[in-house]
Amino acid sequence: MLNMLGLVVLLSVMGLVQSISVKTPQKSLNVTVGGSGLLQCSFTTSSPTNKLSIEWTFVSKSAGTAHAVYYYQAEAEVISKPYLSRLTPPAYPNTTMNASITISNMQVADSGVYSCDVHNLPDIEGNSEASVAVTVLGIQTGVMYIRNLSQFEFGEYQCNASNALGFATCKLELVHEVGEGAIIGAVIGALLGCVLIALLVWFVTHNMKKNKYRAAKTTEANEMKASRAEPTRGSPHQTSVTSRGVTMETPTPREENVEA
């Protein structure tokens, strides 16, 4: 610090001190857990950038301790261990004048203040630092349990949620749903019912046909018996039917005893 202060005094005396300006378009940033945060930082300088240096530091919101995140100087860069697989460094900051970084897979512990500090000798005066306050929102769920459901609980439910990122809503339709086992049982029951009905129809139809057959056989038997019945006693004549007609037979005279 003393060496830097002495250098500033020396350059000021020599009249070589110029200004540098560092700025960020955002003072705060909200990110959801697991999301990526773009920490924007740009600068302007009037001197060649061969001595450009960029340093990002972080102060935790919970612990309040500061530690290094990223450092760049003379086209060489260093990324702190906690950010090795998560930090995307700026591309060619010495020509683009852009010192922005991106941190992915952010967690609640990443909430805090990130500071971008840029120096480019001999431009040491002016505003050389810009900060961004980052808030990582923890994902929370709201669950409502309804026990002992009745018909009064069925219907449409609406869930509303809001945070620093905005507002969202969702709707849910709660309906009475028959279980798979009940559906299978109903199908089996219906099939069995159809089989029983078919058997009942067959049984009734079969009995009706059987009764008609018996009645017809009984009638036929009675007719045959009637046709075979003998003629009435005392009839003086016998009648026979042939295919040629009716033949009349005369009674045979009985022998009578004649008394002498």
Image (spheres, rainbow, N blue to C red):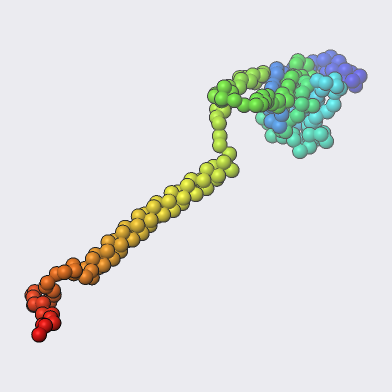
Residue in the foreground of this view, choosing between 179 and 204: 204
* Quadrant of res 215: bottom left
Query: Total number of numbered labels?
Result: 0
Residue 94: % across, % down: 71, 31
Outermost residue on the front side: it is 260
* Quadrant of res 175: top right
Q: Is residue 161 left or right of residue 108?
A: left
Residue in the foreground of this view, choosing between 83 and 124: 83
> Is residue 226 shown above or below 5?
below
Residue 114: % across, % down: 77, 23
**Residue shown at the point (80%, 25%) measured from the top left:** 57
**Residue shown at the point (75%, 16%) measured from the top left:** 127
Residue 113: % across, % down: 77, 20
Q: Is residue 204 visible?
A: yes
> Is residue 87 shown above or below 24?
below
Figure quadrant of the N terminus: top right
Q: Is residue 43 visible?
A: no
Q: Is residue 155 left or right of residue 18?
A: left
**Residue shown at the point (57%, 22%) measured from the top left:** 152
